[in-house]
Image: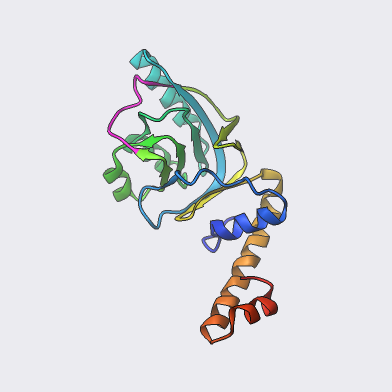
Amino acid sequence: MSGSDLYTAAVADVLDAHGLGRQTLPAAIGPLRPGMRLEGPAFAVEGEPRAQTDSDASIRRILEMLGAVPPGAVAVYATHDDAAAQFGELSATALQAKGCPGVVLDGGCRDVGFIERAGFPVFCRYATPLDSVPRWDCRAWGHTVTVGGVEVATGDWVVADDDGVVVVPAALRDEVLEKARAVAGTENQVREAVRRGVAPLAAYDEFGKF
């Protein structure tokens, strides 16, 4: 299930109602430019910085990982790094060619201008020209990672927009997304009522939402 009518605030509200109040990734992870959004199944990627890494071995591991990302999946990186760019324009080109909706990085991105012009959504913590090769090792993928205290398992559903990134556990995906669309519909009604002059409290009493 997918659709552009979904937004992260509605999804987070539904997760709150399920008692899952810690499914939002750290606020520092945001879009390269305003207006970017993505939605799709997560594909977990994990690595770590290394002081001395063989460049050829490093790039081969990264390319192997990019080849393993399923078409239509959102690669979610737990980089354990705060210096290098683990993602760039050629990686974006490879994933965009597969129909991947975007990438979420608890790390860095470079070639920002190229990626923006390509229209490929990237959510990350920082931008830097510093290449991850040979400073970072891609260690594992297709498993479960932890980003800012939030577990992200391969197959979980990721929704990201200007407000941030929310992760829906795979087992709850259909239920949460359906309810989130209902929330969005109710909020549209509240918005129109308030625009007509209905008092905020009266709108809340009528619709049970504000």
Q: Is residue 197 above or below residue 1?
A: below
Location of residue 101 in the rendering, given as x and y in whole percent from the top left corner:
47, 47
The residue at 59%/83% (across/down) is 199
Please, which colouring scheme is shown? Answer: rainbow
Seen from the viewer's position, the closer of residues 125 and 97 is 125
Location of residue 1 in the rendering, given as x and y in whole percent from the top left corner:
62, 55
Answer left or right for 54 relative to 15: left
- Over which residues does the magenta segment extend? 127-137
Seen from the viewer's position, the closer of residues 60 and 160 is 160
The part of the image, by quadrant, that contains residue 103 is top left
Answer left or right for 108 relative to 43: left
Q: Is residue 93 above or below residue 159?
A: above
Instruction: Give the quadrant of the C terminus.
Output: bottom right
Location of residue 73 in the rendering, given as x and y in whole percent from the top left corner:
52, 42
Principal SS element in the magenta part? loop
Residue 21 lies in the magenta stretch: no
The residue at 61%/46% (across/down) is 23
Residue 129 lies in the magenta stretch: yes
The residue at 41%/54% (across/down) is 36
The residue at 65%/67% (across/down) is 182
Location of residue 5 in the rendering, given as x and y in whole percent from the top left corner:
54, 64
Q: Is residue 5 above or below residue 32?
A: below
Answer left or right for 4 relative to 186: left
Q: Is residue 97 above or below residue 205?
A: above
